[in-house]
Amino acid sequence: MYFLRTKASFDAAHFLKDYEGKCKNIHGHRWKVIVEIAKETLETEGPKRGMVLDFGDLKAVLKELCNELDHSLIYESGSLKKTTVQALQEEDFRMIEVPFIPTAENFAKYFFDQMKERQVPVHRVEVYETPNNFAAYEE
């Protein structure tokens, strides 16, 4: 089995609605995402012969996904009042609504699924919320 890894990061704020602790308040992180892909065989023909996948292609996909979330407030659907969302939008804040609680665990699954949708042979995704704390997802 061959494995490749790459990483990218993005800065974004979030909060955990109904959480008992500091994370119930809006706060930000420099999220680091590490994607590991796996494949039994290498390409045998063409310009990518001898590769699992071109590192440039892998990095580009992950960078695109991270850029979509960068410098935003990521919030769970239904976790903010409509008037709050409207007021923040009127101030031109960049907000991204997601259908899950924006935890590191859920982001790991989110990135895994997004890579899979893009036909990347993803094996594992790690999402670091801080330099010492991460969540991982693999199937």
Image (cartoon, helix red, strand yellow):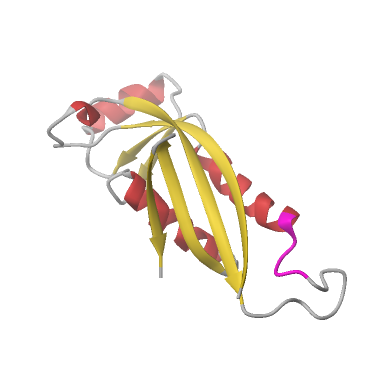
Above or below: residue 68 compared with residue 82: below
Q: Residue at x 82, y 69 (%)?
A: 48
Magenta part, dominant SS: loop
Q: Quadrant of the N terminus?
A: bottom right
Most foreground residue, 108 or 134: 134
Residue 9 is a magenta residue:
no
Q: Is residue 111 left or right of residue 57?
A: left
Residue 33: image x %, image y %?
50, 46
* Residue 92: percent from left, percent from top: 45, 23
* In the foreground, 69 or 27: 27
Depicted 84 relative to depicted 121: above or below: above
Above/below status of 48 relative to 26: below
User: Position of 4 compared to 17: left or right?
Assistant: right
Q: Residue furthest right?
A: 47
Q: Which residues are magenta?
A: 51-55
The picture places residue 83, in percent across and down from the top left corner, at: 24, 27
Residue occupying the far top of the picture = 91
How many marks can you see? Answer: 0
Q: Quadrant of residue 58?
A: bottom right
Position of 57 relative to 39 (above/below) = above
Give me the residue at 75% from left, 61% from top: 54
Which one is nearer the viewer's eye here, 15 or 132? 132
- The residue under the point 41% across, 70% down is 139
Left/right placement of residue 50 relative to residue 60 reads right
- Residue depicted at 87% across the width and 75% down the height: 46
Residue 54 included in the magenta stretch of the image: yes
Residue 110 position, x and y percent, is 42, 55
